[in-house]
């Protein structure tokens, strides 16, 4: 094993051996090189006052070389903030700004110990980093039965982990914390579990309330008390889009200092929060009372990034930083939130109106981009195909009964026509 990796592992073991036990084989072996091109380039940046022939970019007139036709479209920004490589861990100013934003939006983090967010190539990359560092063959990754299908690819296919599902809702259509606890305790012989909590949930648009979140935290604490090392990942892709009575901040704050056997990780990003999907700017943040562990995990994360994408898009990071620093940011974001909330509320009004009879039910939703219908009289795939072929409407069929509708991308005045047409397709396929 590389001596740098060994040093990081020893630092983790000294402060909390349970966190070391959570690491995968790759997680234990990975490190960020302190010798080589990056370190020598960093040294030259500080000392090479005459010529710096280390960096793999081109300079012209003392500035990063660029094409005028590209710079003309980006004239609001300096070339230095666009063309050079960003550091593997991300633009320092952006990391600091995002951390400050996290504290403002998550009051429970105010007195908690957590690291500086590391920039990722959006949420999927962040989850992939988690999988590389912590998921090994046969490790249990516990997710609800209504989930984002990419978890299977990221944790299961890529890392060989075992996907363990539990029902998202209990009989009262509240979060099924008992199911989560049962799935956790079933891993006692393994001594380790990875839990992914995605709120607002994709595909249902559901976020538990404070009472239910307390029960989730209690279930995870119970498992830790039973000797299970638990890596808990808060997948906060749709964070902030809370439209009704629900938890109004990330559950990461409640988990941050829960138990020595619990490692809380927050994966979030500007992609959906700030409506910049194509920018691919995300973050991964670790919580621990140990600065040594936070540093070691950051170094290992940088190692994974260096070994895969090397670093994330510098222009995208600059654009997001500019937005966060703008005095107009809060007002413009509130404007978009109000639009999204209006669409969600309109969907609820339509579904609660009684106009659609008993052909479907809908799963509780109070946040995010989506909602899910539970079809009672036909199968979801038949309806999906009927809507697409006969009416030019796209939806997502999930399993036999569930049809996901992304109200986020439908103007409020068009929602009535959308659901009327879905109802029509359900009736038509029910009679086939």
Image (tube, rainbow, N blue to C red):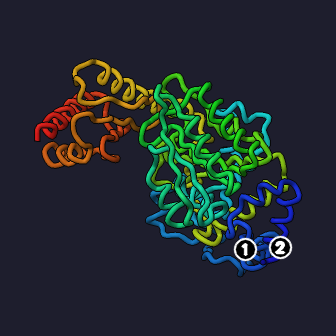
Q: How far apart are marks 2 and 1 (CA)?
A: 14 Å
Name the spot of residue 326 as percent of width and height, x first. 59, 39
- The residue sitting at 76% across, 45% down in the picture is 114
The location of residue 367, given as percent across then percent down, is: 47, 32
* Mark 1 element type: helix
Crowding near the residue tagged with mark 1, few <14, some 14–19, many ≥20 C-alpha atoms within 10 Å? some
Instruction: Using the image as rendered, state which of residue 171 and residue 422 is in the foreground.
Output: 171
Tag 2: Cα neighbours inside 10 Å, few (<14), some, or many (≥20)? few
The residue under the point 73% across, 72% down is 29
Q: Residue at x 79, y 55 (%)?
A: 18
Asked whether, in this view, residue 365 is left or right of residue 123, the answer is left
Q: Which of 191 and 269 is in front in this view?
A: 191
- Do callouts 2 and 1 mark residues in contact (Cβ within 8 Å)? no
Q: Is residue 341 above or below residue 326?
A: above
Q: Residue 47 carries which label?
A: 2
Disc 2 element: helix
Asked if residue 87 can be seen in this view, the reply is no
Q: Residue at position x 57%, y 72% from top?
A: 65
Residue that extends furthest to the left in the rendered view of this protein: 432
Residue 158, given in percent of the width and then of the height, sits at 52, 67
x, y (%) of residue 103? 70, 36
Disc 1 designates what residue? 38
* Quarter where residue 395 is shown: top left
């Amino acid at each position: 094993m590389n001596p740098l990796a060994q040093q990081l592992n020893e630092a983790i073991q000294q402060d909390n051996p349970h966190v070391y036990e959570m690491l995968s084989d790759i997680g234990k072996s990975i490190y960020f090189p302190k010798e080589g091109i990056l370190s020598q380039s960093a040294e030259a940046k500080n000392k090479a006052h005459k010529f710096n022939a280390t960096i793999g970019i081109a300079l012209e007139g003392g500035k990063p070389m660029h094409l005028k036709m590209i710079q003309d479209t980006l004239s609001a920004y300096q070339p230095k903030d666009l063309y050079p490589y960003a550091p593997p861990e991300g633009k320092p100013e952006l990391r600091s700004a995002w951390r400050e934003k996290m504290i403002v939006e998550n009051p429970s983090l105010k007195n908690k110990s957590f690291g500086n967010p590391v920039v990722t190539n959006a949420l999927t990359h962040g989850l992939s980093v988690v999988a590389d560092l912590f998921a090994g063959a046969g490790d249990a990754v516990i997710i609800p039965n209504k989930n984002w299908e990419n978890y299977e690819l990221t944790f299961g296919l890529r890392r060989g982990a075992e996907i363990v599902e539990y029902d998202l809702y209990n009989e009262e259509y509240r979060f099924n914390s008992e199911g989560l606890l049962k799935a956790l305790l079933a891993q006692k012989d393994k001594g380790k579990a990875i839990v992914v909590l995605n709120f607002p949930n994709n595909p249902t648009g559901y976020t538990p309330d404070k009472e239910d979140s307390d029960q989730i935290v209690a279930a995870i604490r119970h498992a830790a008390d039973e000797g299970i090392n638990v890596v808990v990942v808060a997948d906060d892709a749709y964070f902030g889009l809370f439209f009704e009575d629900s938890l109004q901040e990330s559950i990461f704050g409640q988990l941050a200092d829960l138990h020595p056997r619990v490692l809380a990780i927050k994966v979030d990003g500007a992609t959906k929060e700030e409506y910049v999907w194509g920018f691919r700017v995300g973050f991964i943040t670790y919580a621990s009372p140990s600065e040594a562990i936070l540093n070691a995990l950051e170094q290992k994360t940088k190692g994974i990034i260096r070994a895969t994408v090397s670093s994330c898009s510098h222009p995208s990071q600059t654009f997001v930083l500019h937005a966060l620093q703008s005095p107009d940011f809060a007002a413009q974001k509130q404007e978009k939130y109000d639009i999204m909330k209006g669409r969600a509320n309109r969907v609820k009004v339509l579904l609660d109106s009684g106009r659609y009879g008993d052909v479907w039910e809908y799963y509780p939703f109070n946040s995010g981009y989506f909602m899910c219908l539970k079809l009672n009289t036909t199968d979801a795939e038949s309806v999906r195909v009927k809507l697409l072929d006969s009416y030019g409407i796209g939806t997502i069929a999930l399993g036999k009964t569930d049809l996901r509708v992304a109200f986020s991308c439908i103007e409020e005045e068009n929602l009535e026509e959308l659901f009327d047409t879905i109802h029509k397709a359900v009736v038509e396929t029910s009679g086939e």
